[in-house]
Structures are given as C-alpha cells and as structure tokens.
Amino acid sequence: MNLFDIKNKVFIVAGAGRGLGLQLSKYLSHQNALVIGIDKIFSSEKDSGFFFKKYKLDLGDKKKLKKNFTKIIEKNKKIDGLVFCAGITDPNDEYDSFSEAKLEKVFNVNVQSAYVLNYLVANFMIKKKIKGSIINFTSIGAHQAFPKNPYYCTSKGALKQLTKSFAYDYGSKGIRFNNLVPGYFKTPMNKKTLSSKNKIKERSKRNLLLRWGDPSEICGAVHFLLSNASSYVTASDLVVDGGWLNKGI
C-alpha cells in the first residue's frame, strides 16, 4: 500500500487563484487528485485546465459565504480534504492608526471564512462517513510578533487555535485538522517586500537556509497531511519556514 497515494481524492483548495494556493492546486492535480478551486479572483484563465471544478467566491462576504459555499459542497458525492490557504494582510503605517474596519476586513477572510469552510466541510464528511483531512495555512506571524501588522498576526494566531479546537471536537469522527505554517515565500502577497533587495536579503538572513522559499516547496508538506501517511497526525503545526522560528541570534 502506498500511504502517499492521493489518486482520485477530492480536495477543496480555498485561495486557489494565485500564490501558494495556485501552485498547490497544480501539484495536487498532477498527483491525479481532483481539485476544487475556490477564490474571489483567479489570476489566469490558462491555469484553469487542471481544476476539476472552479468557483469564484468572495471569502470576505460573511453574509453570503455560508449559503454559497454550502451549494458548492453539496454538488459533490465526496470531499476528502480541505486546504484553506486564503489570506489577506493590511499593515499599519503608523502606530496610532488602529482601524476597526481593517481589523474586521482581515478577520472576515483569515478567520471567519476559515471557520465557515472548516465547519461545513467537516460536517459534510460526517454525513458522508468520510475520514478526511483539513489543513489551515497559518503563518510564522501566528507564533511571533511582526512590526505594524497587528491584524494579520492576531488573525493567524486565532486561526491556529481554531484548528486545534476543531481537531479536538472532530477527532472522534476520524477527521483530522492541522496547521501548515509557512515562512517567507516568493508569492504575490510579499510583492512589496520582494521589490526591495535589502528586504529580501534581510529576511533571507533570518532563517537557517538563508533564502526565501519557492512556492513549489510547500507542496510536499501538504501532500503528507492530506494523505494516509499522516493518519495519526492531528492538532499539529507543520512548520515550513527554512528554520525561521528555530533561529536564535
């Protein structure tokens, strides 16, 4: 038996339109999995061929999200896994510029929509008697403080604990919940930082491998958590950060 075999498994990838989610969707498709892509905007129509199904969905619209996502999952006979890798950030430029509007905007996508998707998929799995795997992308920002970015760090910390709470509640049903903790990757979310050679160099020095991650380097960890190779792994934080969190002075 190949514990890593995911052929014909059905996985939802939320945040599949670009960045790590897009790279991951392509990878899973090449492993003969069936990928259902969810995002507000898909970066390129030419990248759509590998999706089993694709739906445009605004994860920040909390009024319509539950209703619209329920319609999506009910169109499927089975769902074997969910990867929630959607996320937004909205940094502060000034220390005294706290904005409740920004806080709500970031939490709507990073936490509330994760809650809705996790909850609906897990209960769909129970209904269909599927022992599935759900992965939430948090961040090294869920473990450490970063300057002028309280909304993002707080939201990812909340998501981290949401995963562990769901792992507790659904473990008896055979449904596993884990966090995937990325460090710095070359993605559109980091576009501003990547435009500065000094910032690229500075952040490269902060981890043990002395470089940024390529989006393709997230795929192996996710494959492990989605497959039967990780059948006894739940409520865990799988860190893929080049050693950032482990580095001292």
Image: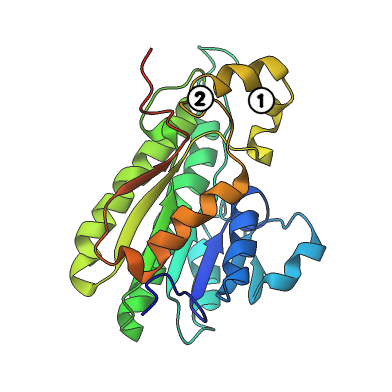
Q: Which residue shows up at 79% across the image and 58% down it?
A: 44
Q: Which residue shows up at 65% across the image and 37% down it?
A: 186
Q: Nearer the viewer, mark 2 or mark 1?
A: 1
Q: Which x, y percent locates residue 1?
A: 36, 80
Q: Which x, y percent locates residue 142?
A: 39, 34
Q: Which x, y percent locates residue 235?
A: 26, 53
Q: Earlier in the sequence, mark 2 or mark 1?
A: 2
Q: CA distance from mark 2 to mark 1?
A: 14 Å
Q: Is residue 118 above or below residue 228?
A: above
Nearest to the observer: residue 88 or residue 8: 8
Does residue 28 appear to the left or right of 191 in the view shown? left
Q: Is residue 177 above or below residue 124?
A: above
Q: Quadrant of residue 144?
A: top left
Q: Quadrant of residue 225?
A: bottom left
Does residue 199 appear to the left or right of 47 in the view shown? left
Q: Quadrant of residue 153?
A: top left
Which disc is residue 207 wearing? none
Which disc is residue 193 wearing? 1
Three-letter residue code for mark 1: Thr
Residue found farthest to the front:
1
Q: Which residue shows up at 42% across the image and 39% down it?
A: 156
Query: Callout 2: few (<14), some (14-19), or many (20+) C-alpha neighbours within 10 Å?
Result: some
Q: Are marks 2 and 1 in contact (CB under 8 Å)?
A: no
Which disc is residue 149 wearing? 2
Color scheme of the displayed model: rainbow
Query: Callout 1: few (<14), some (14-19), or many (20+) C-alpha neighbours within 10 Å?
Result: some
